[in-house]
Each structure stands twice: as structure tokens, then as C-alpha cells.
Image (cartoon, rainbow, N blue to C red):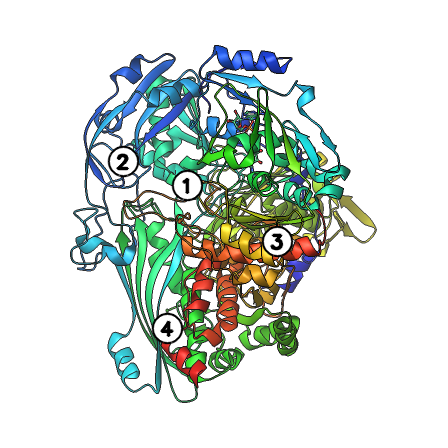
Amino acid sequence: MDAEIARAVGAGSSAPRIEDARLLTGKARYVENLDVSGCLFAAFLRSTHAHACIKSIDTTRAVAAPGVVAVFTGVDLLEAGVGPLPFHEVVQREDGGPMQPPARLALASDRVRFSGEAIALVIAQTRRAALDALEHIQVDYDPLPVVVRARMAHAEDAPLVADGAPRNVVGFMRIGDKAKTDAVFARAAHVTRLSLTNQRLSASPMETRSVIASWDRDRNRLTLFAGNQAPHMAREQIARCLGIPNDDLRIVVGDIGGGFGMKLVPYPEEVALLFAARSLKASIRWKADRTESFLSDTHGRDHDTDAEMAFDREGRILGVRMRVWANMGAYLSFFGITVATGSGNRVVSGVYRIPTLDVEVRAMLTNTAPVGPYRGAGRPEAIYRLERLLDVGAAELGMDPVTLRRINLITPDAIPYLANSGQIYESGNFPRILDQALAVADWAGFDARREAARARGQLYGGGICCHIDTTSGIRPFEQVGIVANALGRIDVFSGTQAMGQGIATVYASMVATRLGIPIDHINIVQGDTDRVPDGVGSYGSRSLFIGGSAVVQATEALVDVLRQRAAAVLASNSGDLIFEAGRFAVADRSIGIFELLARTGGVEAQGRHESKFVFPNGCYVCEAEIDPETGVVTIARFSGVDDVGTVIHPMIVHGQVQGSIAQGIAQALYEEVVYDDEGQLLSASFMDYALPRADVLPRLSVETDETSICPTNPLGAKGAGEAGCLGAPPAVVGAVMDALAKFGVRHLDMPLTPEKIWRAMRTPTPACRAEMRS
Amino acid sequence: MMYEFAYVRPASLEDAVRALRMHSEAKPLAGGMSLLSAMKLRLAAPTHLVDLGRLDGLAGIAGNNQAITIGAMTRHADVAASPIVREAIPALAVLAGDIGDRQVRHRGTLGGSVANADPAACYPAAVLGLAGTIITDRRHIGSDDFFRGLYETALETDEIVAAVEFTRPARAGYMKFPHPASRFALVGVFVAEFGAGNVRVAVTGAGPRVFREARLEAALAKEFTPTVASAVAVSAEGLNSDRAASAEYRAHLVSVMAARAVAWALAPTSQS
Ligand SMILES: Cc1cc2nc3c(=O)[nH]c(=O)nc-3n(C[C@H](O)[C@H](O)[C@H](O)COP(=O)(O)OP(=O)(O)OC[C@H]3O[C@@H](n4cnc5c(N)ncnc54)[C@H](O)[C@@H]3O)c2cc1C
């Protein structure tokens, strides 16, 4: 990396967000706000069973209902040759054969595999007519046995979700060296064992999924207006499903009211609506209501794990063994399996020296909604199990959890470090980050705060987490076009996709600063597969360090062309020109960019950046207080340090860190998607699904450290969008378990609800009872 | 999205009752915070909504030495801010000020809450705890006879709550343990002492309807202190058991919240 480049694009200063005036005054272009004339309205009939054969579907009365234009079922799609939704073929089955997940049709035709799966689509003149007609469709189900939990789905006698997945294992992944690990465990001084669950979560964006599928009569092709985070990728996947060339589908995004990875994958509803729009040569609107969103959005996490860590006498880690059952839901969403077998495993050994490991991940089918990427996508699960093992291990070894971590950290002299996940940690100084986090947290004052809390009758504990993220994900490139016209307007075209983060602000301020011109000349174009020729999208914290790096490359290319032109105009050698504050100068002659453009005409330039995986990291410290009468947890303090490489826009970085920590705290304490044993969703509204509110979140003191900038991109940035979701849950859970230590509690699964904690306090373990007797 | 319905806005209580009588599937509309949500979810489908919003006589707060009377259409925010309520029964003002969010408090009404009889609502605990009287267009109903079951009251289908009269206690307190998601009462306990030996304890959220806890009442009648309340083992029998809390945990919370409500009654702290 080049400190000069970061400086030239204005790293470290926070330009005001250019999106906000629009977003905060009701001028956002969410799909529901788009004024597409003459739209019909759609409603989906959803399965009330979690697993059943569909014996028959009778739509006669619905077709005849007032205002109804058409009713489609899975058979209509099959007959028209609409294919199943694609999935990412990244691993194989446990027996080495190719994965055979159940074909996911946009409308289920003969079998439903989760409650909420779409079965029929009604198109009507009004939304109400469409909803009313749903009640006239008769579905005759033949119920099948149901399995909901990943671990249970692996049992010999568990009901099978699909024929192609023996014992419900749809895909399998092994990392490490089993024999070596077995040997290490056999001679270890101590082995810590833990079974844990990383619970299922709902992304819960403010804007639920919303679609307009439209037939373009003039050009005989389809347009999909939808809040997709990666429109170019979605176009390819959906076009394949519809059996049409990419060019026959345009995707237009507009603004997205929160995505968190959930809006990264293509959805069955989109395919069905496009099919209907093509059949009817019409424009059709649909928006998920909140219950539909809970039922049919991809969920996140949901891993059951048996985790083991072997230590020597001094507490050094000798090896790790993990058996993971990752719940995929009933079908593979496009990246469902990637989360479990790819992204998380790149940080499987965290920031620690782990000489050998043996990890098996089984991707399990169950009768639940498909799981997909959700902020962190696999890395929160990986970091959580390691950090929990270290906390429990420390207690068992009688060591301080900070010390145990410190002696196992990868030291800076070993960087770049080849982890036994096969990944190379390109930069980082983990001990330094740990020390700084302890300083920011005033860890030295912890004992006094604990005493003060005890004096108030409260339980008090501290927890720590050293996390490492891996950003970029698949397709690690972005292509950016930049077009400056003769009037001085500069359009920047990027395939990355804003969903509230402020991408436009950062791109525009980098270009404006580098060119030395006011920011209002820059126009960032995203989210339209017609206007943006190529790109990938926004996920995996990649927009800045990949997309932004491409913007920087394109800007440099633009400057180079302009420099040639300026040299000609100023009758000089281009190498002699100095470019500063928007002017090219040599000796006493100079010309500004705008004059140059006016005199010589518009310019186009391209930039491309392709990245390796990058590893942002950090350390969080949490202090939690527990009300011993009720079990209620209050986060007393939350502090830490993040290494996200160069901080280009501090305000946006801190916003990302805050948001992801809030989601991480929420996972630790509140959120959980729950299905009953029949596969019915019990958490289908915000009356049941507990999102955090501002009043339960502490003031965060989280700082950034910029001493280990990223060497593999021109900005030195690493990505800042997700680390909080990795680091916060272990830190919070660690703090609560520390507060409960005197009751002999080793581990409780998230979310740490008051009742769970109350029960743990009431039912001391046998060991604890013995201690209390003595 | 709701089913279709007709909207009626009567100008007098008599007209409102007449409208309800005319259409068997008609429902009064107060703040709409509960009713409209149920309609949007298609859980309720009245053919007619009879809007009580223009019945000015139904809103307002008046008090004397014995009681305060609050009109059915009085908004939660107005109860919370009322100098009369804050002076006479501060616990009631605090209760109203902690219902839902700001929007809900400015739309939702006392009458709507009482008529709705949500098993987790806050107001029913105050009505029962303060030996309230429900005044309707046709009669007075004592609070002990009013709350019948899950969303079930003594009201006839065409009967409209006009006001609720609350007895002034010597002191009172309300403590709510909020549901983690909805923030309705997972358990809410209203305690009121009306002079020597006369204590009422009303519990909401814990059972299928608001109810009085006899053991707590008896213990607190002897000695009105938090310690006494904490020492009462509340039975879990008949209490709600769901994903948010088991009956056993709810029973435990009843005595904890009762103790805290007593402590508050003895030394009221901040009012919202
Ligand atoms: C987000 C949210 C959070 C909430 N949190 C809480 C909370 O923490 N605690 C709590 O107690 N409540 C809570 N509520 C409920 C709130 O207090 C409602 O306002 C109240 O329950 C209903 O009052 P309303 O005026 O809105 O009645 P409506 O919704 O208009 O009516 C409710 C029912 O009562 C009937 N009705 C209304 N007025 C009369 C009348 N005068 N006579 C006869 N029948 C009548 C209606 O026909 C309907 O059946 C919450 C609501 C929301 C939306």
C-alpha cells in the first residue's frame, strides 16, 4: 500500500454524508416508492406445513374472485421451463459425490419443506384483492415428519428432507489433519470440551423485501426492481433460472433499507414474479409483510458444534477439534453453504497459533427456512466457538483468560502468517491490539468496579474476545468506470451496492479530494445493470477496499489522461506537470480540470481491483452486571480496538463498528429465531422476536488502530462492516459467564435470557454445590 | 392489509351505542393501537368501525379526596402528564408513562386498554389494584367483576366504556418486568395500600387475565414492606408458560416485582 494514495484521497477526514438529505427527508428510492404506472399486485400463498406432500391445489375459486388477473402454481412454472434456483457448488457430499440439494422451485409443486414456502402466486388489480383471493385457494396436504435442529437431523432415524442428502447431510467439508490432531489430543495435559449452539437469527431490515417485476414492451425484456446487494450476480442467477440471456433482464436497485447479507441472494418470489410479468406482459408489485419476512427471508447462523481444545501444561494450545452441524434450512440459498464451509473456515484458527486442527463441517437440511449470509456470515460462528473454548479452558486450567489468550497469540514477527486454515494473514499485530483494548477498557480498574457492583448487590463479570475477520468473499474484484464530461460532471460507475453504509459519500469524497474539485461534481452510479457495465456487489465488508480501490485506480487513470491533455495544452512534457488542487501546472503556466475538460472534451477511464482475502481484527472487552433476583443482564461497559487498516472515513467506520457491535450484543442477549418441533415459526413478529433497543445498548468506547495497514490494496483498508458481529457475542457471553462463575456455570447458549440465567443461579452444578458445602 | 370495513363517526355516546347495536360485527375504535394492528394482521375483521374520537365528553381527568375519574378516551400520555394523577396516584402516572412508545402513548387510550383486556396490558393491573369502577354508557362495573378472561370482559357487545374511577390509595406502586420483545408486561404487579390492613395486589402478564394475588395481599396487609413481599412464595399453578418465560419464572417474578412495587410505594423515585 501507498500511504501517499490514502492521503491523496483524503483518508482520515469525515466528509458529511451526501445520501442523508435524501434518505432522511423521505426522498429515498425504495422499491415501494417507485412510481411505476399501471402495476398489478401480487400475493403469495405459503405453506402452513413444515413438511408435506402437496396432493392437490385448487385455484378455481381464486381465479374467479373479484379483481383477480391470474393465479400461478409451480406446475405453470415447470411447464414453461422455469428452472430451480441455483446454489453455490462449493463442496461435495460426505461420500465424495456431487451435492444434490432438493431442487428449489420458485413455487413448490409437489412437496413443501418448510413452513412459509411459497406455493401459489395471485396477481390482482389491487393488493387487497390479491390477499383476499389467497383465502380461496384450497391446498390438500399430506403431512410428513419434521426435523428442525441440525444436530437432530443427523440422527440415524431422523426424517429425511431430500433424497439426495443421506442423513440430511447435503455437503461436507474437512479441514486439517485428523491423525495428527488425534495424536496431540492423546498426549495433551488438558482437553476442554464444549457443546454449543450459535442460534438462528433474522436479519430484520427496516425495509422488507420488495419487488416490481416489469415487462418492457418496447424492448421485449424484463426489468426487476429489487433491493439486491449484488445486482450483477443476481441477474446472472435469475436469468439462468428463467432460461434467458443476461441481457434480457435488467436489475434496478435504487435505495436499500438494510440488507445485512440477507438481500444478497436471489429469491423464489423474484423468479415467480418475473415469470408472471412475462406471461402477462405486465408490471407487478409485491412487498413482504413483516410476518412473510420472518418466514421467508434467509436466516443467519444456526450452527450446532462439538468443540474441543487440547492444551499443554502451560496453557499453550496444542490442537483443536470441531464437529459442526450447520443448519442450511430446507434448501440451499445461493450462498447458504458458502457461509458454513467457506467464509467461516478461513478464520477457523482465529488469531492463535494452533499447531494442528481437525474440523468437520456438515451442512444439514432441516424443515426450516433456508439460511444465508448474515452480517459476519460464518466468521461469528467460528470465532465464538474458539473464544468460548478459551474461556472455559482458562477456568479449567485455573488461568486468567487474558493470559491464556496472550500466550497463544500469533506474534507480529510471524506475520505474514500461514494459518492452518490455509489462509495467509497479511498484516496485523494481535498482541498490540490486545494491550490497547485492555488500556481503553481500563482493565486495571475492573476489580474495583466488580467490588462496587457487589456492594450494590449485583453480580459482575468481565469478558474478552480477540477476533479476526476475513473480508472480500467470492469473486474478489470490482470494475469501475469513470466518465468526466466537458461540462465538468464526473460519473463514477460501480457494481458495489449501497444499503445505508454511505458508499457514495466515501467514493465521491475520495474522487473529489484526489481531483481537487468540489464533491458536488461527482455522481456515484450504482445498482443498475444497464448503466453499470460490470461489477459484483456489496457483501463481506468489501465495498471500500475492493470497490474503493478500483475507484482509486480509475481516478488515477483519469488523472493520467488529463495529464497528457494538459501537457499538450500547456506545451509541456507531461512528466514535468504538477497536479495540485485541481490544476495542472508547469512553471508559470497552469490549467484547471474544468477548463481542460471544456477545451478538450469528455474523458473516460477504467479501474479494476482484484483482492486477496484480507483479515481485519480486533479485541473487545465487555463488563456485564446481573441482577441476581431476576437474571437480567445489563452491559456496564463495552470497549475495544479494531484494526480495519487505513480508516478512510472515520465517521462511517465508527458507524459500522457500532452497528455491528449492536447486532452482536443482540445475538448474545436477545435475538433468536425459534421453530417448534412441528416446524412452525414461533418468532414471526416483533412481539416475539426481540430486537435490541437503544436503551439496552451501552456507550461504546471502541477505537481503531492504523499501524498495520493492508499491503494488498492501494488504500491499505481491510473492511470494517462486520467485526462487531464476531467480537461482541463472545465478549458479552464471557462477561456473563464470569459473573456466574460462583454458581459453577461453564456455559449457557445464547441468547442469555433472564430466565436462563435465573435457572443457572438456582441450580448450581454438583461441583459448585460441593464447593458451597465446604 | 385489512379486510374492507365501513367507518362511522358518531357525535354522541347515544349515537355510538346505536351504531354498535345496528351492526352486529361493529366495534368501537379508540386509539386503534390494538384494534388496527389486529385488523392489519387479519385477526380481527369488524364490518364497521365506530370511531369514538369525536366524543369529547369521554376524555378528561377529574379528582376529589376519595377518587379520580379518567375518561375512556384519555390518552396514556395525558394520564402520565396529569398533575391530578401525579399528585393523587403517582404510580398510575408512572404506569401510563411506561406503556409502549411515544406514538402509542399519544394514541392509545385508557378505555381501549381496559376494554381490550390484553392479558399483558398494564392498565388492567391498576384498575384492579386500585379497586376501580368501570363506568359505561349504562352501568357501573366493579373491577373485581370486570376482567373475565383472555381478552374477555363483562362488557356487552354494544356497551361503551365512558370512564374509569380509581380509588385514591394511601400509597401505591407498579413494577413491570417487560417482555424482551414486545415490552408489554411479562409480569406486572400493582400494589396499593388503602389504610391499615387493606392492601390490594393485582398481577398482569403472568396469567390468562389480570388477577389478585391473595397470599401477597394477606402478607402485605400485616406488614407493608418489600421483605415481606419477597418472602411470599407465589404459586406457579395456572400461570402462563411460553417461550418468553415459564410459569415458574413468572411466579418468582411476581414476588420480586411485588417487593419492588412496595419499595417504590414507600419511597417513590422518579416519575417519567
Ligand atoms: C407498540 C405497542 C406497544 C404497546 N405497549 C404496551 C404496554 O407496554 N402496556 C400496555 O398496557 N399496553 C401496551 N400497548 C397497548 C396500548 O396501550 C393500546 O393503546 C391499548 O391496549 C388499546 O387502546 P386503544 O385506545 O389503542 O384501543 P383500540 O385499539 O382502538 O381498541 C382496542 C379494543 O377496545 C375496544 N374499545 C376501545 N375503546 C372502547 C371503549 N371506550 N368502550 C368499549 N370498547 C372499546 C375496541 O373495540 C377494541 O376491541 C402497546 C401497543 C403497541 C402498538
Q: Is residue A171 visible?
A: no
Do the residues indicated by labels 4 and 1 lie within the same chain of the protein? yes
Q: Earlier in the sequence, mark 2 or mark 4?
A: 2
Is mark 4 in CB contact (under 8 Å) with mark 1? no
Label 4, secondary structure: give it.
Answer: loop
Q: Amino acid at mark 3?
A: Ala
Give the CA separation, mark 3 to mark 4. Answer: 57 Å
Horizontally, residue A621 falls left or right of residue A91, namely: right
User: Where does label 3 land, which residue?
Assistant: B261
Check mark 2 vs ligand 1: CB closer than 8 Å? yes or no. Answer: no
User: Where does label 1 land, which residue?
Assistant: A684
Q: Residues within 10 Å of mark 3 (few under 14, many from 20)?
A: many
Do the residues indicated by labels 1 and 3 lie within the same chain of the protein? no
Q: Chain of mark 1?
A: A
Q: Position of residue A1 (x, y in %)?
A: 58, 64
Give the CA separation, mark 1 to mark 3. Answer: 33 Å
